[in-house]
Image (cartoon, grey):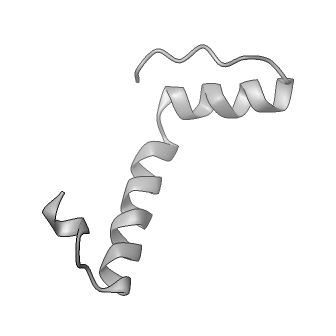
Amino acid sequence: MNAALFPLLEVQLERERQRIIAQGGTADFLEGLSAFVEKRRPHFRGS
């Protein structure tokens, strides 16, 4: 939390990039994407 208070822009963008990559491969991400495309409510499982 403290690291996010006063980071340089480049540092913050790199952290964000890493989180997006990590989250993009989860089952919940894929479920959300599928639900959006299929126009239905997502059923997240916490994974």
Which residue ends up furthest to the front in the rendered image?
A: 5
Q: Quadrant of residue 36?
A: top right
Indicate the quadrant containing the N terminus: top left, top right, bottom left or bottom right.
Answer: bottom left
Q: Residue at x 73, y 28 (%)?
A: 34
Is 4 placed left or right of 42 in the picture?
A: left
Q: Is residue 27 toward the left or the right of residue 3 in the image?
A: right
Does residue 27 appear to the left or right of 39 in the view shown? Answer: left
Question: Where residue 19 appears, x then y in whole percent?
Answer: 38, 55
Q: Relative to 22, say whether 10 is above or below.
A: below
Numbered circles on residues, count: 0
11 left or right, relative to 35: left
* Residue drawn at point x = 45 percent, y = 55 percent: 21
| Residue 43, picture quadrant | top right
Figure check: 4 above or below 46: below
Task: Work out whether 16 lies above or below 28.
Answer: below
Q: Who is closer to the viewer here, 46 or 27?
A: 46
Residue drawn 43% across the image and 65% down it: 17
Residue at the extreme left:
2
Q: Could you say where residue 42 lies in the image, as x and y percent from the top left?
A: 66, 19
Residue 20, horizontal then vertical, whole percent: 46, 55
Question: Which residue is depicted at the point 40% across and 24% down?
Answer: 47
**In the rendered view, would you say 39 is above or below 18?**
above
